[in-house]
Image (spheres, rainbow, N blue to C red):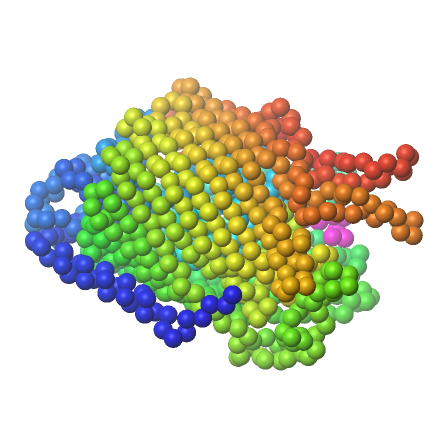
Amino acid sequence: MQRNYSSNPLKYAQILLLFVFSYYSITGYAQEKYTLSGVVKEASSNETLIGVTVAVANLSTGTVTNEYGFYSLTLPQGSYQIVVSYMGFKEEYVTVNLEQNTKMDFALTEEAEQLAEVVVSEDVERLDVRKPQMSVNTLSAATIKKVPVVLGEADVIKSLVLLPGVTNAGEGSSGFNVRGGAVDQNLILLDEATVFNSSHLFGFFSVFNPDAIKDLKLYKGGIPARYGGRVSSVLDIYQKEGNSKEFKVNGGVGAVASRLLIEGPIQKDRTAFLIGGRSSYAHLFLPLFDIDSKAYFYDVNTKINHRINENNSLYLSGYFGRDLFSLNESFVNVYGNAVGNLRWNHLFNDRLFSNLSLIYSDYYYGLELDFVGFEWDSGIQNFNVKYDLKHYLNNKLQINYGLNNIYYVFNPGEITPNRSNSGIIEDQLTKKYANEAAAYIDVEHEISNKLSVNYGLRVSHFNRLGQDEFFAYQNNQAVVFDERQQVYKEATPIDTLTPGRGGSLAKFTNLEPRLAIAYSLNDNSSIKTSYTRLAQYLHLLSNTSSPTPLDVWTPSGPFVQPQLLDQYALGYFKTINGGDYTLEVEGFYKDIQNRIDYIDGADLIANNAIEQVILNGQARAYGLEFLFRKNEGDLTGWLSYTLSRSEQRTPGRTAVETGINNGNWYASAYDKTHDLSINANYELNDKWSFGSNFIFQTGQPTNYPVGQFQQQGLVVPIYGERNKTRLPAYHRLDLSATLTPRKNKNRKLQGEWVFSIYNVYNRRNAASINFSRNEDNGRNEATRTAIFGLIPSVTYNFKF
């Protein structure tokens, strides 16, 4: 259903702001207070640190650094002991006599490979437990590198699927699914820029170089109001800024791919650069086996940061990646992402921090079929302007607010002949254009020692702009229902309109409230609940369980409504034995309106009237998640388990229509009833460490034939209801061992060897099951297709 609050959609945000500032005016001046603020960095590189806890030792108060390492604490006049702590770094203690507004930066020193000795203080622990934010998972680059993966290449996405509520469509599949959502329902950000395809080599690797990653957060629910545009999750990744102290090099050489990252100062302590690259090279060995095919990828991460003065900093970051797959030069497929972001951090005063970003993002897909004689290009571009502010009113009240505007260009496809005698006529599918604008306010409010609340509102507006050609249909229906055959069919256009880019085909405005509440039962446990409403205006057209590079993005418009999510979550959180162990239990329920579905026999490739094969349906998902972590000691890791259900349905639009699947709920392609993951890492000594994964998942829903008939000598299969059957259960065990030579301590070059075995017991997990007729006996037979069996690998990592 289209939502239109055109009267004054910002009045709700104004009311919220009025309440917040009224509260501040009552409480803010009760006594003389001063502000302690600054930036927390890593001592060896000047890299700012995200999420560092800055706490007051003799008070139950504190804060954490933002995405750029900035913190702000407002306290009554007096003397305080400040504790600065961050996992993997030595704690800093400093006494501050606060008699005026004071700026104080901190430089933390790494615990030299002794993570087990890091102590999390009681105050820090309490702050984490009491924080309203829930349904969030974080993984450090160090943790990601310890996870055994296929072909030995550390991988962000493969690590994420070990967390509760996160799955994928199996080996060799692109992307990931969160709480029963589709891949296109994940917002993936790299330095704030949208990444539309997160996979290399059709899912065997992710596009994220772990050496270049500084911070990673996956929001599954309770999503802050500053995020929008997707209804399932937000994966927010920040790249490192570069070492402004000294030149550093690190990288790795593996069986199929290698990587190298260089960082260093341009102007010491003020300007730094980072450049990293990866490339696979297994295709170089294919000619040795007389194989005239190629499959490889490469990518580049770059960043420059410059500190203008203590109140202003500039950042320029970028990513460029490409994949190439070819068969005998007659089939060539090239695709990849390119993103860039120019950011300006400005500190208005010790309580008001701002960030202005100019962002460009592009996803390109190219295909050349030489035996047919044509080339195919498609993609999506966006240009984004963001302005975000964080206002530290006091230690109990912080406000985030901002604006952003995104302009989209969609290229569904352009076909051109690649030789003079190809017989192909050049054609451009109609390009689409859209603009998405949003304003938000998000409040972090500690009401009492036991009760904390995050509440906010996002107002989004989407304008589907005009285009060169647009089809009109009778009764405004692009899909018609044939009552005699009881099937949906493509409608025939009755007119072709030429509205031009200056016009507007459809407009949507949505209010997206957010609420998260945490109630502390004691210093070590709390109950949290959240409500999230999100609107998604972009749709990925794919009728396969795992998206392919050929899948095309399309905007909402006259025939495609925006997806609208309402998600509810309730959880229990507990730290045990001073933070050595943590337990998280969450239940969730998701309801999604206007989830697109496809009529039977839908053709999505090179379709200039995609509205003729899709309908607006519904989706829902619900489940229970468990995450138990062991954070300290020689043995660390976690156990996660998810019990969930993901379904969708498309009922008929009128009483005579059957809808899709007779209008009944059916399992979505990403429904996994049981999902169990165990990750364990053991530090034997300073020379040897070991890692392991065990994964078990319910088989993916699929369609098997339920019968057959013969027509003109051909056997035609008959399929029943959608996704009524499943592939066999998926499970595997991975092991790894890391050898760190003791002579590393006495030399500048540090190296380590990583030995891993993927799928130790050689489980032939089914990627698909195909049915065919045996020509010898005439019987139908099922054939299981498995991608990976047991795969050993070795990687050498180095740094100097």
The image position of residue 676, as x and y in percent, is: 52, 32
Dominant SS type (magenta): strand
With 789 as the anchor, is 738 left or right in this view? left
Range of magenta residues: 321-331
Residue 742 visible (yes or no):
no
Residue in the foreground of this view, choosing between 57 and 493: 493
In percent of the image, x 55 and y 60: which residue is there?
594
696, above or below 206, in the image: above
Magenta-span inclusion, residue 643: no
Residue drawn at x 57%, y 34% as measured from the top left = 697
Residue, x 8% and y 48% (percent of image)? 77
Image quadrant in which the C terminus is located: top left
Give 115 or 618, whichever is nearer the viewer: 618
Q: Nearer the viewer, residue 389 or 748?
A: 389
Q: Is residue 422 left or right of residue 778?
A: left
In the rendered image, residue 722, in percent from the top left (x then y), is placed at 67, 48
Q: Residue 503's x, y, as percent?
A: 53, 79
- Residue found farthest to the front: 655
**Residue 423 visible to an observer of this rendering:** yes
Judge by depth and name the residue closer to the eye, 725 or 193: 725
The residue at the far top in this view is: 684
Q: Quadrant of residue 658?
A: bottom right
Q: Residue at x 67, y 76 (%)?
A: 474
Q: Is 628 placed left or right of 182 in the picture?
A: left
